Amino acid sequence: METANINTLSRRNLLKTAAITVASSTALLTACKPQNSEKASPASSPKQDAPVAVEENRYDCFGSHQAGITTPHQLFGNLTTFDLTITDKNRLIDYFRILTARIEFLTQGGEIKDTDPRLPPEASGLLGKNLPSDGLTITVSVGDSLFDNRFGLSDKKPLRLKEMKRFPNDKLNADWCDGDISIQFCAHSPETCQNALRDIIKNTAKFAVPRWSLDGWLPKAEPGAMAARNLFGYRDGSGNPDISDDKVANEVLWTGVAANSLDEPAWAKNGSYQAVRLIRQFVEFWDRTPLQEQNTIFGREKYSGAPLGQKHESDTPNYTGNCESDKGNCDGNSIPLDSHMRLGNPRNAGWERHRIFRRPFNYSLGLAKNKQLDVGLLMIIYQANLDDGFIFVQNAMNGEPLEEYIQPFGGGYFFTLPGFQKGEFLGQGMFDI
Ligand code: HEM
């Protein structure tokens, strides 16, 4: 999907499309073009990753890229991975066809049609009889395990797709790692994500079972802010590349398009690598840490989000100083060499190829066994080249002062499938159909 748009249609077209929706005998047959509303497009928000709160809108699900990456960051998300229970290539094709049809219906919205009361209802009912689109995007990615010997797809594997290995500060729990399929749901309300997840679990139950699932959310946008705050109270995403600019998106996101990914298989063009990291944050400990130390750890000022020594969130950080926080030689106005953001992007020559696009959510799982809050970051990172992107950046950050306050425990590497056009299905290129 190039960009996610809210399209405005004439009232006639709106009614016409609605009529088609109602007339369809099953929910699978709906179109998925945006059709409603003259409300302001979230694409006009100050920065692509700044969260938007919009009551009702629809994102196009057809295009060269899937929706949910360059789409303005919705406030709610869920990421669920699935293990396939089938072993046959034709069944896998059926799975992707059904998944695609559900995505078309769910992201479009429409009337739920229960055809026979002796059968289970079409939908969960959580959203009533008329399913709103509610800014829903559903983004499907595949794991390294899809390309094992089950489906005869091993020669189709994207070159950099692999199993996630632990980094020094990780404490990976297999129950929260990997999966054959990753599905990211994002919407303007948590119930829309839940409804879509339940719909897909139900409609693909003969093919796949969930492996792990995590709900995420963001705080409401602050006026003028470029990014939402994470649970440490810092704006997270300010330094993201501006992927609302197609040129930047082509350089950073899309495989087979970005200069460092031209060697990928042809079918994978316009996909992206998705690195997912589930990172617990020790917030009680953080809340007892002096403000100056917090600022130094990130390299930004807590409230304004400005790089230390600057005024505005959008200001370019000044990386001329060479102080190191553990030597105590930083004055609170200079950005330490070992600060999170300077390690993550020192902005020096040659770093262009290591740019990544972060699209995270906060999560909460209540209390841990020790009665401390079990909360953190559902980090989702997109890039055209996984080795140059997340893996390189994480290696650069290993040992950073932030590690004392965080604990990665899960996630995985996935390849986000290229987008699809009407009449096609997700992943079609893998099957030479
Ligand atoms: C709980 C874990 C994390 C927290 C709380 C966190 C928070 C932040 C904050 C507050 C910033 C500064 C604002 C911004 O530019 O967005 C930042 C920047 C950044 N983070 Fe993280 N982050 C976390 C994990 C990660 C991970 C796992 C990666 C990837 C390996 C990462 C990569 C980056 C990068 C590349 C930057 C931007 C540097 C720039 O371009 O200026 N972060 N992070």
Image (cartoon, rainbow, N blue to C red):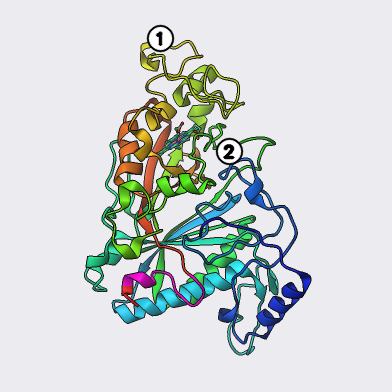
Queried whether the magenta region covers residue 426, the answer comes back as yes
Label 2 residue near ligand 1, CB within 8 Å = yes
Identify the amino acid type marked 1. Asn
- Check the image and report above or below for 191 versus 250: below
Q: Is residue 202 visible?
A: no
Position in image of residue 366 (x %, y %): 53, 46
Q: Which residues are magenta?
A: 421-430
- Residue identified by numbered label 1: 329
Q: Is residue 21 above or below residue 341?
A: below
**Residue drawn 63% across and 50% down?**
43
Instruction: Name the kind of residue labelled 2 in the image.
Output: Ala
Circle 1 SS class: loop
Ligand 1 contact, mark 1 (Cβ < 8 Å):
no
Between discs 2 and 1, the one toward the N terminus? 2
Image point (49%, 76%), residue name: 203
Q: Main secondary structure of the magenta part?
A: loop
Q: CA distance from mark 2 to mark 1?
A: 30 Å
Residue at image location 70% in from the left, 36% down from the top: 223
Left or right: residue 294 compared with residue 58:
left
User: The C terminus is located in which quarter?
Assistant: bottom left
Please state which of residues 80 and 397 is positioned toward the viewer in this rendering.
397
Give how far across and how far down residue 379 sits, in percent. 45, 45
Q: Which residue is mark 2?
A: 227
Give residue 333's position: percent from left, percent from top. 51, 14
Judge left or right: residue 246 versus residue 149.
right
Q: Give the residue at x 27% y 47%.
A: 165
Q: Residue furthest right?
A: 11
